[in-house]
Structure formats: C-alpha cells, structure tokens
Image (cartoon, rainbow, N blue to C red):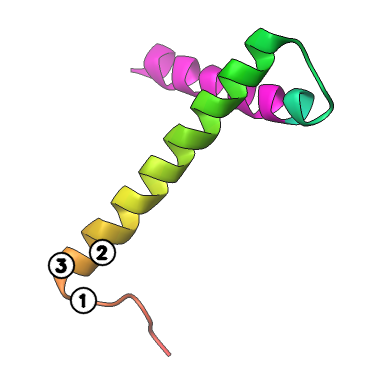
Amino acid sequence: MILVLLGVLALVVGGCVCVVWAARGGPRWVRVVSTVTVTAGELLSAGMKGSRGRNGSSSSDE
C-alpha cells in the first residue's frame, strides 16, 4: 500500500514539475505531460464538486 501511495505521489510531483517547465517553454513531451496533468486535475476537481452537490449537504460550518 505504501509503495502505491509513493508511486502516486511521484506522478503528482512529476506532473507539477512538467507544468512549471512547460510554462517556461520546455520540450514537446513536457507540454504533453503538462496538458494531461492539468486536464486530470480539472476532471478531478469537477468530480469532487459534483459529488458534493449530489449529497445534498453543504460543508459550511459557519
């Protein structure tokens, strides 16, 4: 289980490095990895927003 989590962490960190590198004009493969990373982040973010709305509960404890 720890190895799987370390692998996921390495992919996330590597993706973030590629996003920064692509913003500075890196090679083509870096721009491809950057696009995949940003797209995956947007999909995960949209999925989290959608799952919160489906439960019918809000998490604001003001």
Q: From the image, tell me which residue sits under label 1.
A: 57
Residue type highlighted by circle 1: Ser
Q: From the image, tell me which residue sits under label 2.
A: 52
Contact between labelled residues 1 and 3, with CB atoms less than 8 Å apart: yes
Residue 16 lies in magenta, yes or no? Answer: yes
- The span from disc 3 to disc 1 (Cα, nearest Å) is 5 Å
Instruction: Report how many numbered discs are placed on residues in the image.
Output: 3
Residue bounds of the magenta highlight: 1-19
Q: Secondary structure at mark 3?
A: helix
Q: Position of residue 30 (x, y in %)?
A: 67, 15
Q: Position of residue 53 (x, y in %)?
A: 23, 68
| Residue at position x 53%, y 19% in the image | 11
Contact between labelled residues 2 and 1, with CB atoms less than 8 Å apart: yes
Contact between labelled residues 3 and 2, with CB atoms less than 8 Å apart: yes
Residue type highlighted by circle 3: Asn
Quadrant of the image occupied by residue 55: bottom left
Quadrant of the image occupied by residue 59: bottom left
Residue 27 lies in magenta, yes or no? Answer: no
Residue type highlighted by circle 2: Arg
- The span from disc 2 to disc 3 (Cα, nearest Å) is 6 Å
Q: From the image, tell me which residue sits under label 3.
A: 55
The local crowd at label 2, few if under 14, some if 14 to 19, many if 20 or more residues have their Cα within 10 Å, is few
Left or right position of 52 against 61: left
User: Is 6 located above or below residue 45 in the figure?
Assistant: above
Q: Secondary structure at mark 1?
A: loop
- The span from disc 1 to disc 2 (Cα, nearest Å) is 7 Å
Residue situated in front as seen by the camera: 39 or 62? 39
Q: Secondary structure at mark 2?
A: helix
Q: Position of residue 45 (x, y in %)?
A: 41, 50
